[in-house]
Image (cartoon, rainbow, N blue to C red):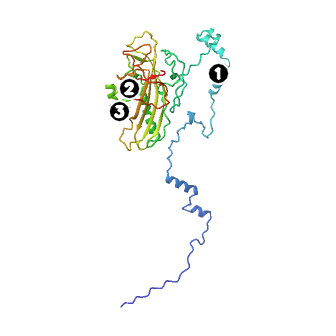
Amino acid sequence: MPIAEDPDARPAKEPEHDPFEGLVLDEDFVRAATEKEQSARARMLGARWRAQPPEAEQWRPPTEIRRRRFGRRAKVVDPWGRRKRRRSWQTPLFVVLAVAVTLAALNVGRLHSWYAVHFGTDSDTTTAAPSAAKPAAKPTHTAAPETAAPTAAPPAVADDTPTVDHPWAGSPAADWPAGASAIVLPQAQAVGAFDADQVATRLQLVKDYLIATNLDPAVIAGGSPQAALDLLNSKAQANLAAALAKHDKDDNPLGWLTRIAPQEAALVGSTVKVQGWTKLEGDGEDGLLVHTDYTFVYPVRPGTDSHPTGSTWTARVIERRAIDFRFYDPAHYRVDSNKIYMQHGSSDGAGAACNDDDGFLHPDFPKYTFGDSMPTAQGAPSDPYDHSKPLTVDPDAKCGTASRV
């Protein structure tokens, strides 16, 4: 059998050679080095630019003259880079103009006389006594729009007869804000499944609906409420369209909007006084609730088909509407986010006949009666301007009595 030979023995260990022996770290060695250690700032910028590369600087041709802010001229320099000084005619002109304006301000009277002589104005007007100051215009309203339900009814005002020139005489609504600006929306904030922007959009839908149904002059005069129909969801659109077509006791459009019989009455001017409030409320998975409670006051006078002897007769119609709007969470319901869904609504009014089953309000003019006689009022008097209490309407109730209109 073969015998394995012993491996050769390792040669004796020679002393290791030091590669840096005789190396001199002088200035020539440093200049000759092919690789150099980066500075701390270079390493920091390199790490930052690897994570977020810097934007490339826009290249500009070397001959371009860069404008400074406000369009001022670029500096003019000579071939050695020294700024050239130019003579300017503008400075003396500005000084002369400044002196002229100052002198004119110190002697306005003579300046006015000079203008009157040279441009044909009657010179007598310069010496005439100044006219009496005009009285300050009376503010259109003093009461601010409400942000919540008031705690009491509006205070009593002096009893006065309204006229075409003064349609708010004797009414607490004289100090109320008017028109669409009186419908002040609360500050939009995230509620439930909706963020602040989505809440703001839905609040605006509510305001647009209140305007389209209660402040649009064409709708008040009996015109088509197409803007209101476009805001409603498909089911509510069908219900309002049916009420407009039928307008009977069981399906009356007056529960949705304000319409005054145009043959009997017309608005005095274009101002409708409004007071009320809007409030937000979260409703869990169901989404968002918007509560509204507004009272609208309409000044009216006899219409085209009536011929009373007094041409200045004026009355007022009052409508209070409390409506809850619901906006469902689209993650849980199949809904159109751009349409309105009404949860509950009720209305009550004064100043018009309560037998308005034809779909129009018939104002009550104290000095004149249109058509059939007014039904006899029953029950204790109530204040139609008072919206400090929740609005509850009994559908079987008889015609009530208004303490003031």
User: Residue 123 location, x and y as percent?
Assistant: 62, 9
Q: Where 118 sits versus 97, above or below?
A: above
Q: Determine the CA span between mark 2 and mark 1.
A: 65 Å
Question: Which of the two residues, 221 or 314, is positioned nearer the viewer here?
Answer: 314
User: Dot 3 lies on which element?
Assistant: helix
- Numbered disc in front, either 2 or 3: 2
**Circles 2 and 3 in contact, beta carbons < 8 Å:** no
Local SS, label 1: helix
Q: CA distance from mark 2 to mark 3?
A: 15 Å
Q: Residue at x 40, y 34 (%)?
A: 344
* Mark-to-mark CA distance, 1 and 3: 68 Å
Residue 248 at x, y = what percent? Answer: 33, 25
At 39% from the left and 90% from the top, the residue drawn is 3
- Residue picked out by circle 1: 101
Q: Please identify the quarter of the rendering in which residue 214 is found.
A: top left
Q: Is residue 336 left or right of residue 173?
A: left
Q: Quadrant of residue 90?
A: top right
Residue corresponding to mark 2: 254
The three-letter amino acid code for the residue at tag 3 is Ala
Quick one: which residue is furthest to the front in this view?
Answer: 379
Of pointers 1 and 3, the one earlier in the residue sequence: 1
Residue designated by label 3: 236
Q: Is residue 313 left or right of residue 30?
A: left
Q: Is residue 16 visible?
A: yes
Looking at the rendered image, the disc whose residue lies closer to the viewer, 2 or 1, is 2
Q: Identify the secondary structure beneath mark 2.
A: helix
Q: Is residue 338 left or right of residue 274?
A: left
Total number of numbered labels? Answer: 3
Task: Specify the quadrant that holds the N terminus.
Answer: bottom left
Observer-nearest of 373 and 293: 373
Circles 1 and 3, Cβ within 8 Å, touching? The answer is no
